[in-house]
Image (cartoon, rainbow, N blue to C red):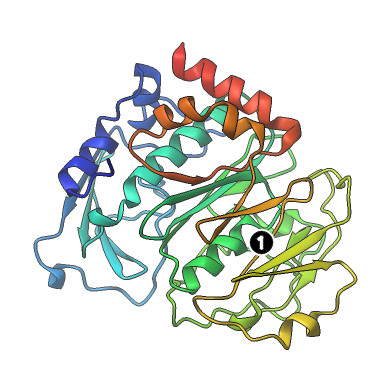
Amino acid sequence: MIPRNYKDTVQLILSPKLPALAEKILMGQTTPCTGKESFAHKLEIVPARRRADLTPPGKHMLIDSAYRLNETHFHEKCIYKFSKWQYLVKKLTPSHWRIEVAGDIFSHLVWPYRTVGSLLKVLLCQHGLMSFHSAGFYDGQDVALVLAPSGTGKTLTTIHFLCRGGGVYNDDTVTVKDGKIIPTPWGMHFWEHRYKNAPEILPTNMPVFTARDKWRLRASRVLKAASLGMVGLGSRLNIAEYWPGSVPPPAEPVKIISLRRGEQLRVDTNTPVEVLRNRLWGDLEYQCLPVLRWRDVETISGIPFFQAGEFFDRHRNFMDKLFARCRLTTITVPARYSREVFECINEAIHS
């Protein structure tokens, strides 16, 4: 049963029905191996008394994660706007933070997704896995969580769902330090890439996305690996060469799949951009997303998602227990890493 009362939702976050290790992770008593995040030992999430208390400043920025209160990106008594909701972040003490929320946010189950994402990312980091990138959104019914290496197009996929009114969007990065990649809340620093004029898919100061926003990529930017620009939102398709040391070359050609009701359009690297640009893009009907290079794409209840294969089907009971009452629509793990990911999470949760 999905909780609809915000008190139940807050209780699910602050006191999740998980073993002691998971609760310590969520409450910030352990830190990932990157050592760059500053976790709050005590976090309060409360409804704002009046919407007038939250006057948005001139500069907005999306909240990275409720459990990653980094002083670099969360400042005292600053106000942030997240879609149609507004957050007031207060630093009461160095280890005690409070987030006041204006709007009907708790009924939309934003926090269970953050709980899940924070738990998985920290566990992956603690076990020294490769650089993983997660992105997710909530469409009013299900929580979608995407886990895969950087450069596979997950970020633009979730942005597209959000821009078409798909729901709440959150983007976090998990990076194990290897001396070559510097992690930021939205990805790698752009100067770590081969092309210095090619910023990461999401900049550090990320704009606020709504269904009416027209967010445009830079005309000259180079995207990683397989990324699909949202043509209907003024972006362009750009498939770049692989970044050195990021993702191994695919076993099959890079494919981009666009989904419409009752229609599938497969696009490979040789398809001109104009083929997509000349098509009609509807806010609610047309859904396009890049596909993981070594996986297939399926559709369930009209919601495209990356197939997790045997990893999700075989361990469905465990995943249901891990994600508590949160309905999970999407979990994507590359086939070559699925067993290692499950084993490390299973060992950490049940140890």
Residue 204 percent coordinates (x, y): 54, 61
**Amino acid under disc 1:** Glu
Pick whichever, 162 or 119, lies toward us.
Answer: 162
- Residue visible at 65% across and 44% down in the picture: 148
- Residue visible at 67% across and 31% down in the picture: 338
Residue 76 lies in what quarter of the image? bottom left
Q: Is residue 143 visible?
A: yes
Pick whichever, 18 or 288, lies toward us.
Answer: 288
Identify the residue under disc 1.
200
- Above-or-below relation of 179 to 212: above
- Above-or-below relation of 101 to 147: below
- Above-or-below relation of 111 to 336: below
Residue 6 percent coordinates (x, y): 18, 49
Disc 1, SS: loop
Is residue 41 left or right of 159 when viewed as pictured?
left
- Residue visible at 46% across and 41% down in the picture: 117
